[in-house]
């Protein structure tokens, strides 16, 4: 690939595009944060011990007791289902409307690693494809006004001795047009997606090795996840899907296994993620809206997502948009975050391909401090997963991406863009007042983009002011 260092730049103008007619996108962010609906619960408590739960006994599963407390709380108009101090073994939990699952300080929910306990299958989505799969460890479907709170710990107990070992087992490929009789896991589900098979016929339970999420909330409204510790998920940690008005605050998440994304809002609207810490085996935060046919069928973008005052350590990306983004995304605000780890790949990562398509627009990032990352501060990749066998011709687009006051002390590149032959598919990319030191390759790597402007950017102590890059993709580097 041809390299374009920072000094191969022609003089241009800095044009800052805003997501609305307001004075500042950050005013929009404040208004959005204030508009998100909050949860509210009656002052009634349902202690799981009174429903038969017993602590500190590995031979006792408290699944029935915890779910019975949730059902009782829901039937009586809502309130708090209390997990008191102690260690409680459990299987899958289903949240219902008007229930706050609250873990006292010192309370631990330890989830079973026996897959059979997570059957029968339920409606969910796995890597952007709709399916019937294992019951997530904590699950809600069409529930309103729900919460998971408290200073306790929710631990999926996943490791390479159990759930995480499935990552290799589910990865069996296929060639387009072949029968799915011999396929399992990812490949089988992707073909079911491609063939538009009804969701209820996409049974992905036993024998397919698709791991369940730690928390999966589908078609829910008014959600709060606050102050809990989340550990060792089989798959993604927090996965709200087709849901609105979500607040994730003061949560400490660590899950270093494969596909260990921290928080993945998918086709969700009005989401606030604040004061959280992430240490993940995959993206810390990944915004999605469905994969290929399924994403286009629903055609529900993710939109209006705020990430502020968060800390990111290990992860493929600090904040990613995609790659399952077929329904599109708009309006991301990243404010006052800190990111650093030798195991952190990219800071801001936008990705898709011509199978997935999707429009990504209006990304605003300011006041982000990075100690180190392995790859790039900003990475835009429209050639992600080039070997994907699904039909192509769905052209993605990224536009109006703005970074301001972002510093990084070590990376490969400042900006890396791998666009398409049509450079207009990546446009209006603007960086202002950024300081990138310790840049390994001494600049940027940009192909297939128009209107990339740098204003007062310092790369390895050399300042770029009011300069613009416009680079077509070079098919013969």
Image (spheres, helix red, strand yellow):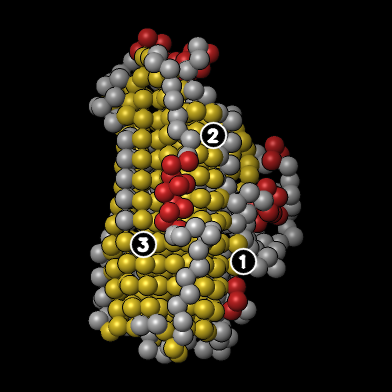
At label 1, counting other C-alpha atoms closer than 10 Å, the crowd grade (few under 14, some 14-19, many 20 or more) is: many
Give the image location of residue 337, x and y in percent.
32, 56
| Side of 138 where 438 appears, left or right | left
Q: Is 223 drawn above or below residue 126 in the view shown? A: above
User: Is residue 190 among what the camera can see?
Assistant: no
In the image, what residue occupies the spot 54% across and 34% down? 221
| Of the image marks 1 and 2, the number of the one nearer the N terminus | 2
Quadrant of the rendered image containing residue 101:
top left
Viewer-nearest of labels 3 and 1? 3
The residue that mark 3 highlights is 366
Q: Is 103 drawn above or below residue 443 in the view shown? A: above
Gap between marks 2 and 3 measured at Cα: 29 Å
The residue that mark 1 highlights is 396
Which numbered tag is attached to residue 430? none
Q: Is 72 drawn above or below residue 267 in the view shown? A: above
The residue that mark 2 highlights is 221
Give the image location of residue 394, x and y in percent.
68, 65
In the image, what residue occupies the spot 30% across and 78% down? 458
Q: Are marks 2 and 3 in contact (CB under 8 Å)?
A: no
At label 3, counting other C-alpha atoms closer than 10 Å, the crowd grade (few under 14, some 14-19, many 20 or more) is: many
């Amino acid at each position: 690939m041809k390299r374009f260092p920072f000094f191969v730049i022609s003089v241009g103008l800095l044009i800052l595009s805003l997501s609305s007619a307001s004075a500042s996108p950050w005013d929009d962010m404040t208004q959005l944060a204030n508009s998100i609906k909050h949860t509210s619960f009656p002052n009634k408590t349902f202690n799981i011990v009174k429903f038969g739960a017993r602590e500190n006994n590995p031979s006792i599963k408290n699944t029935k007791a915890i779910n019975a407390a949730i059902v009782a709380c829901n039937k009586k108009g809502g309130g708090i289902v209390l997990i008191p101090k102690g260690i409680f073994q459990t299987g899958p939990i289903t949240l219902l409307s008007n229930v706050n699952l609250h873990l006292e300080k010192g309370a631990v929910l330890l989830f079973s690693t026996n897959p059979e306990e997570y059957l029968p299958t339920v409606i969910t989505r796995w890597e952007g494809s709709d399916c019937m799969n294992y019951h997530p460890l904590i699950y809600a479907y069409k529930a309103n006004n729900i919460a998971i709170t408290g200073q306790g710990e929710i631990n999926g107990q996943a490791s390479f001795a159990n759930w995480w070992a499935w990552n290799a087992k589910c990865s069996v490929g296929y060639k387009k047009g072949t029968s799915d009789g011999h396929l399992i896991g990812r490949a089988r589900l992707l073909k079911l997606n491609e063939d538009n098979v009804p969701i209820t016929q996409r049974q992905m339970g036993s024998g397919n090795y698709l791991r369940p999420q730690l928390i999966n909330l589908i078609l829910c409204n008014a959600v709060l996840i606050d102050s809990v510790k989340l550990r060792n998920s089989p798959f993604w940690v927090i996965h709200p899907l087709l849901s609105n008005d979500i607040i994730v605050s003061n949560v400490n998440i660590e899950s270093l296994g494969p596909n260990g994304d921290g928080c993945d809002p998918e086709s969700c609207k009005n989401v606030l993620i604040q004061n959280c810490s992430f240490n993940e085996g995959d993206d810390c935060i990944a915004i999605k809206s469905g994969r290929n046919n399924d994403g286009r069928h629903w055609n529900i973008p993710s939109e209006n997502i705020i990430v502020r005052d968060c800390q990111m350590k290990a992860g493929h990306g600090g904040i990613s948009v995609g790659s399952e983004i077929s329904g599109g995304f708009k309006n991301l605000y990243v404010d006052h975050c800190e990111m650093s780890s030798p195991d952190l790949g990219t800071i801001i990562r936008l990705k898709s391909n011509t199978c997935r398509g999707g429009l990504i627009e209006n990304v605003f990032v300011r006041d982000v401090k990075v100690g180190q990352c392995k790859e790039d501060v900003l990475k835009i990749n429209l050639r992600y997963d080039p070997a994907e066998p699904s039909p192509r011709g769905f052209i993605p687009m990224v536009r109006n991406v703005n970074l301001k006051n972002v510093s990084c002390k070590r990376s490969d590149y400042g900006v890396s863009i791998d666009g398409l032959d049509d450079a207009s598919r990546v446009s209006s990319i603007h960086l202002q007042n950024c300081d990138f030191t310790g840049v390994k390759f001494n600049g940027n790597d940009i192909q297939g983009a128009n209107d990339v402007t740098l204003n007062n950017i310092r790369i390895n102590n050399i300042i770029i002011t009011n300069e613009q890059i416009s680079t077509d993709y070079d098919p013969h580097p």
